[in-house]
Image (cartoon, rainbow, N blue to C red):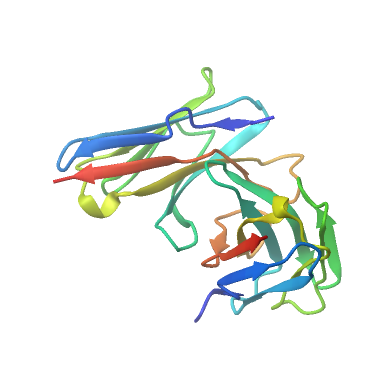
Amino acid sequence: NAGVTQTPKFRILKIGQSMTLQCTQDMNHNYMYWYRQDPGMGLKLIYYSVGAGITDKGEVPNGYNVSRSTTEDFPLRLELAAPSQTSVYFCASRVGGAGELFFGEGSRLTVL
Amino acid sequence: DQQVKQNSPSLSVQEGRISILNCDYTNSMFDYFLWYKKYPAEGPTFLISISSIKDKNEDGRFTVFLNKSAKHLSLHIVPSQPGDSAVYFCAARPLRGSTLGRLYFGRGTQLTVWP
């Protein structure tokens, strides 16, 4: 099994551009999460989903949107990219509301 | 508002000795705690966890201790090995009233184990 797969691994955006970070998991997990990690900081929750068709905001949702049309996929959309969105983004999943999170390898985004 | 705090950004330990990584939390609703390990250019991976009904959990070279009254937990690695060099994140979650299993993370401690 591949686990949690994120694409792209690296991306440079210009201010005002938009893009989508893709996340796919093949473990049939219901719960999926998007975190961002800024240098020297812990992971902060952007959005999460408890199943297909259900999403909700986390700690730092501004400037992002998500959708969950299937169990496997949880894309994160950045609209009108800003330098403050320069970060490493991690997608994660778990089978239910408890237990360990499985993380993807991360997507490093730079907004110039 | 940092509810999970790792006050040491870095720790350097000689191979074979004990590494002790510390974590403090402020939210008394937290009652499940996890440690994650992260290598450069990889995602965090789960290392060990502890529920508040215990004060110690062991897994091989890794032991986590929980002191609920002090709202403090620590991760002990004995003996430390160069391959343990990584960033270690402490995370916490309330089991009841939880925002759907959301984890709160500390800022991480960079452990370097030198030969």
B97 is higher (above) or lower (below) than A89: above
Q: Is residue A73 visible?
A: yes
The spot of residue B97 in percent (x, y) is 77, 39
The spot of residue A82 in percent (x, y) is 76, 56
Q: Residue at x 55, y 38 (%)?
A: B106
Query: Which of the pair A86/B63 is nearer the observer?
Result: A86
Q: Is residue A75 visible?
A: no
Q: Quadrant of residue A8?
A: bottom right
Q: Residue at x 65, y 25 (%)?
A: B28
Q: How many marks?
A: 0
Quarter of the image with the C terminus of chain A in it: bottom right
Left or right for A43, reference A49 = left
B15 is higher (above) or lower (below) than A32: above
Left or right for A71, reference B48 = right
Left or right for B93, reference B106 = right
Q: Residue at x 63, y 64 (%)?
A: A93
The spot of residue B52 in percent (x, y) is 54, 33
- Looking at this view, name the residue that lies furthest to the right: A53
Q: Quadrant of residue B3?
A: top right
A9 is higher (above) or lower (below) than A44: below
Q: Quadrant of residue A72?
A: bottom right
The spot of residue A70 in percent (x, y) is 77, 79
